[in-house]
Image (cartoon, rainbow, N blue to C red):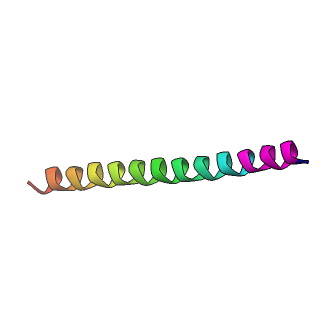
């Protein structure tokens, strides 16, 4: 039973870490896209 619960704990922990990494990556990509978009608008204005 202890090994089983440990396995579940590891799976939950891995899932949690993956969710955090996925969120961080998506936020970073969105920030980069927004930055490029602002750069493009600035270039078009001048």
What kind of secondary structure does the magenta stretch mostly adopt? Answer: helix
What range of the chain is rendered magenta?
A: 2-10
Residue situated in front as seen by the camera: 31 or 38: 31
Residue appearing at x 59%, y 52% in the figure:
19
Residue situated in front as seen by the camera: 29 or 25: 25
Residue 14 at x, y = what percent? 66, 45
For the view shown, which residue lies furthest in the left direction? 46
Residue appearing at x 27%, y 52% in the figure:
35
Residue appearing at x 48%, y 51% in the figure:
26
**Residue 8 is covered by the magenta coloring:** yes
Left/right placement of residue 32 relative to residue 15 reads: left
Residue 2 at x, y = what percent? 86, 47
Image height check: is 10 above or below 34? above
For the view shown, which residue lies furthest in the right direction? 1
Residue 32 at x, y = what percent? 33, 48
Residue appearing at x 74%, y 50% in the figure:
9
Residue situated in front as seen by the camera: 37 or 16: 16
Left/right placement of residue 7 relative to residue 24 reads: right
């Amino acid at each position: 039973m202890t090994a089983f619960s440990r396995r579940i704990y590891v799976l939950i922990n891995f899932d949690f870490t993956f969710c955090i990494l996925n969120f961080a990556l998506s936020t970073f990509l969105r920030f980069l896209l927004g930055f490029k978009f602002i750069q493009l608008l600035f270039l078009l204005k001048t």
